Image (spheres, grey):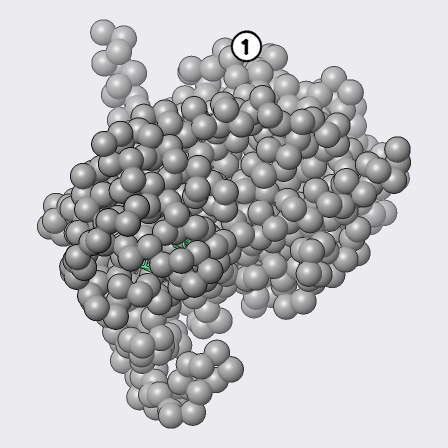
């Protein structure tokens, strides 16, 4: 079932926007749900989030952050008019649509693109939503869209220090993130905090939120394979019970999540992912000579 | 054919790849018969009369076994004709013989009471069935037969939606298409085939065979919508608005986990995840294929069914030392005999009467499994297995990879359908395989829990008949 790429553009450094013809998803998707994409014959299945969609025209927008081989290959090898091999979904449970009151919805890095449809829907429902996007300076995305969608959009950018490696730079983001959250929680009263981003940053933010006792929901991103509840790769411990993020989540109560386990599980394939990336880069360079 | 034959006691063996070679690759282990060997084996069959033949009674879909076997002998001078005639007999009851010939537990079914068993080896029915299907596929004879069938199909003008492209759904789809219905399959994954595609490994059931079966369905006009998850992309209620009937063949895909501390440590896979990575995503070809899998040096597989054997033998092919740990004894192993033998030949160790109680880890990664030693009592449970009890003694087995293969539940997205009656996770059906929702039928693992390919196919076929009757009434009622 091929799905045509209608548009593709780099909207910020390492952030690629794909508008995809996928009517079966466009027709049904709700904020908080995701899809599983397979882009290449020998490729992986990776979860991505519909950020915008048009039910009548049958398209969805996916925004990827270039992390490893698959997202890199997609950025390098796909062009408008090409097709994704598979877009399965929508998957996962939609975000709870209720009047929570005053909500702080946080996105770290490209996580903000997943916050966007949920925050927008919450605001439309009558909530007072503030979105907070913390990322590197050249990686700002959806600023105008968020400003138009919620009560207040706060953007906190961190410069990339060329003298530091990427992990060290990321520490600066974590620092800014937790400082800003603390400042917002101290100054104002909130009914709910919501967050999408790397598990480590989610935990760091949760540790701040916990001090204030404010309810917090997190969108968890464990490694997934099928996304339909068949494999158990995505299992997380929540409230002492084993849950499958793809069918029980992806949204969970941050207070119940076993964060250490989630972080350990997310990193299980790091060495192989790096190897795949290195070999891909090597092949690319070889090909260019 | 009143030829007097002398009894040949010994089975004509099928060539197999030697164990030391096969643990280095995912190529098929059993190489199957040639035409000459197949005829030799076929000649051994005593041609029991149809009404008596115990082999036919033992086959869940009642293939006319002496019937198809006799064709091989009868037309021995014209292999193509022999195979075409034989295939025609098989197809009357079974549309996936290349698969069942490979994966049926023949020793408990067709071959169990074969009369030849009283004087020598039983007839190798599975391998003969497989031969017919393989030869037909390689020579395009199956397509020939199909193309003869297609013009005779009378379009009914009614449509059926099938949920799940496993053996149950594929069979139902094929039968309904042959009866003239417009059939659309909704499949959650990116490839059709169900367990045949994601679960059973290449070395036991080459994926090209499954693909060819699916190709034939497409030629019959069956539409397959992959990436569609019923319960999310579309609901059963919506399907009923668009189609005249629905068949649920969604299998039993949700893995059961062991409720023991440490279950989420890294290195602990469910068999489904492990096999999906290896088979469907071809992780054994990493990094040529992008999906990774990690197989350590010491692998412990928990369980002793077909799934456990497949996981263990796959892990072995990554060079690991593999132990199968089972809480009961050798007599209760539920895997096919051939699989257990192959596993042993390939150097897989078995530990019996051990029940996992804890997974021990280091830095978030598994390093050993702690088991309680069990012992069997004389008393038997409802399934006829000896009851087991803990002894209070424990052992630790070192492991850097653990694969849990203790069974599966039906897919939750389907069983949560409002109005669908479900008991213990299984969809409840009446004698016509109709569920509590009128016009919605179900079969295969979705109603049985974990069963077999042939039972799933049998259900698909039975459901197709029932759907045909249901839709005929509907058609005539509306006329
Ligand atoms: C529900 C959900 C929604 C997501 N939505 C988006 C999105 O809208 N935009 C976006 O850029 N990213 C999203 N992600 C993350 C995205 O799936 C990963 O970035 C992608 O899989 C990385 O693949 P890669 O080959 O480029 O990198 P790799 O080198 O393979 O992996 C880099 C890291 O990505 C994570 N990852 C890798 N494979 C998977 C996998 N199969 N499933 C989940 N995580 C994986 C791991 O933490 C890994 O260490 C989402 C993840 C989930 C679970
Ligand atoms: C590893 C393994 C080895 C086995 N070995 C043997 C063997 O040697 N011999 C034997 O006879 N049996 C064996 N079995 C059992 C046999 O494979 C099953 O009994 C059989 O496949 C059941 O067929 P099914 O069509 O009911 O379901 P499945 O084969 O499970 O197919 C169900 C299909 O439905 C799809 N689906 C599920 N939910 C949805 C949804 N919501 N929407 C759309 N699609 C959905 C799934 O993706 C899948 O493709 C084995 C099983 C396993 C796991
Ligand atoms: S379908 Fe299975 S049980 Fe029936 S004859 Fe073939 S191998 Fe034997
Ligand atoms: S029972 Fe055995 S010998 Fe008799 S017909 Fe069947 S296969 Fe042949
Ligand atoms: S991704 Fe396989 S069960 Fe969730």
Identify the residue at horizontal 56%, vertical 68% (top origin).
Answer: A240
At x 78% / y 28%, what residue is drawn? A149
For the C terminus of chain B, the image quarter is: top right
The secondary structure type at the circle numbered 1 is: loop
Q: Residue at x 61, y 51 (%)?
A: B462
Q: Tell me the quarter of the picture where residue B425 sits.
A: bottom right
Q: Residues within 10 Å of mark 1 (few under 14, many from 20)?
A: some
Q: Picture quarter containing residue B160? A: top right
Q: Residue furthest front?
A: B2
Residue B413 picture location, percent across and down: 65, 50
Quarter-of-image position of residue B299: bottom left
Q: Chain of mark 1?
A: A
Q: Position of residue A252 (x, y in %)?
A: 64, 53
Instruction: Tell me if the residue at label 1 has its CB under 8 Å from ligand 1.
Output: no
Query: Does residue B246 appear in this view?
Result: no
**Residue B363: % across, % down:** 34, 60
Count of residue discs: 1
Is residue A172 rendered to the left or right of residue A144?
A: left
Looking at the picture, does residue A39 appear above or below residue A112?
above
User: B52 or B143: nearer the eye?
Assistant: B52
Which residue: 31% across, 84% down?
A: B373
Residue beneath label 1, please? Answer: A80
Q: Position of residue A33 (x, y in %)?
A: 66, 39
Between residue B308 and residue A194, name the one nearer to us. B308
Q: Is residue A222 above or below residue B384?
A: above
**Extreme top residue here?**
A289
Q: A146 or B239: which is nearer to us?
A: B239
Asked whether the viewer can see residue B70, the reply is: yes
């Amino acid at each position: 079932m091929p799905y045509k790429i209608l548009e593709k553009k780099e909207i910020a450094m390492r952030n690629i926007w794909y508008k995809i013809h996928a009517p079966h998803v466009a027709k049904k998707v709700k904020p908080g749900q995701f899809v599983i994409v397979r882009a290449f014959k020998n490729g992986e299945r990776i979860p991505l989030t519909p950020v915008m969609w048009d039910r009548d025209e049958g398209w969805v927008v996916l925004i990827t952050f270039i992390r490893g081989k698959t997202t890199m290959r997609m950025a390098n090898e796909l062009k408008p008019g090409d097709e994704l091999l598979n877009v399965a979904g929508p998957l996962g449970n939609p975000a709870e649509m209720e009047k929570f009151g005053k909500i702080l919805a946080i996105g770290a890095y490209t996580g903000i693109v997943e916050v966007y449809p949920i925050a927008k829907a919450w605001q439309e429902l009558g909530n007072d939503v503030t979105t907070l996007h913390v990322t590197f300076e050249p990686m700002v995305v959806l600023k105008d869209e968020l400003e138009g969608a919620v009560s207040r959009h706060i953007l906190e950018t961190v410069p990339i220090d060329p003298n530091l490696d990427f992990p060290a730079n990321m520490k600066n983001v974590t620092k800014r993130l937790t400082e800003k959250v603390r400042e917002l929680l101290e100054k104002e009263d909130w009914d709910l905090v919501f967050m999408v981003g790397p598990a480590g940053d989610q935990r760091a933010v949760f540790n701040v939120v916990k001090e204030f006792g404010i309810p917090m929901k997190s969108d968890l991103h464990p490694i997934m394979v099928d996304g339909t509840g068949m494999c158990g790769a995505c299992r997380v411990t929540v409230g002492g019970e084993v849950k499958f993020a793809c069918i029980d989540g992806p949204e969970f109560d941050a207070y119940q999540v076993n964060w250490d386990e989630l972080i350990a599980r997310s990193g299980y394939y790091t060495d192989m992912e790096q190897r795949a990336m290195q070999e891909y880069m090597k092949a690319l360079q070889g090909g260019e000579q | 054919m009143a030829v007097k034959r002398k009894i040949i006691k010994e089975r004509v063996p099928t060539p197999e790849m030697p164990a030391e070679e096969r643990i280095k690759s995912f190529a098929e282990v059993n190489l199957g018969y040639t035409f000459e060997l197949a005829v030799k084996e076929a000649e051994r069959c005593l041609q029991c009369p149809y009404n008596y033949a115990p082999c036919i009674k033992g086959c869940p879909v009642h293939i006319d076994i002496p019937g198809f076997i006799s064709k091989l002998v009868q037309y021995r001078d014209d292999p193509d004709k022999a195979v075409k005639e034989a295939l025609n007999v098989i197809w009357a009851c079974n549309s996936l013989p290349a698969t069942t010939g490979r994966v049926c537990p023949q020793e408990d079914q067709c071959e169990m009471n074969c009369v030849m068993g009283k004087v020598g080896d039983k007839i190798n029915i599975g391998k003969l069935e497989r031969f017919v299907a393989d030869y037909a596929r390689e020579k395009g004879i199956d397509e020939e037969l199909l193309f003869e069938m297609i013009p005779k199909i009378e379009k009914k003008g009614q449509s059926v939606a099938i949920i799940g492209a496993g053996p149950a759904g594929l069979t139902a789809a094929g039968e309904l298409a042959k009866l003239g219905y417009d059939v659309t399959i909704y499949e959650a994954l990116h490839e059709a085939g169900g367990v045949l595609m994601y679960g059973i490994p290449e070395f036991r059931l080459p994926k090209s065979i499954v693909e060819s079966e699916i190709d034939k369905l497409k030629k019959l006009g069956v539409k397959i919508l992959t990436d569609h998850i019923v319960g999310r992309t579309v609901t059963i209620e919506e399907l009923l608005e668009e189609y005249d009937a629905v068949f649920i063949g969604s299998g039993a895909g949700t893995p059961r986990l062991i409720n023991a501390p440490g279950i989420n440590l890294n290195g602990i896979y469910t068999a489904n995840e492990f096999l999906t990575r290896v088979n469907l995503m071809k992780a054994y070809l990493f990094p040529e294929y992008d999906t990774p899998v990690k197989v350590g040096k010491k692998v412990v597989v928990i369980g002793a069914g077909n799934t456990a054997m497949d996981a263990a033998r796959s892990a072995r092919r990554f060079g690991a030392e593999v132990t199968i740990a089972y809480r009961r004894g050798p007599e209760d192993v539920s895997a096919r005999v051939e699989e257990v033998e192959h596993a042993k030949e390939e150097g897989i160790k078995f530990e019996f009467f051990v029940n996992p109680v804890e997974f021990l880890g280091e830095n978030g990664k598994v390093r050993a499994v702690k088991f309680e030693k069990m012992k069997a009592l004389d008393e038997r449970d409802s399934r006829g297995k000896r009851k087991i009890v803990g002894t209070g003694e424990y052992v630790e087995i070192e492991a850097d990879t653990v694969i849990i293969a203790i069974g599966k539940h039906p897919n939750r997205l389907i069983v949560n359908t409002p109005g669908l009656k479900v008991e213990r996770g299984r969809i409840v059906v009446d004698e016509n395989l109709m569920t509590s929702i009128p016009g919605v039928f179900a079969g295969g693992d979705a109603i049985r829990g974990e069963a077999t390919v042939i039972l799933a196919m049998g259900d698909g076929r039975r459901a197709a008949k029932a759907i045909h009757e249901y839709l005929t009434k509907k058609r005539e009622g509306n006329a």
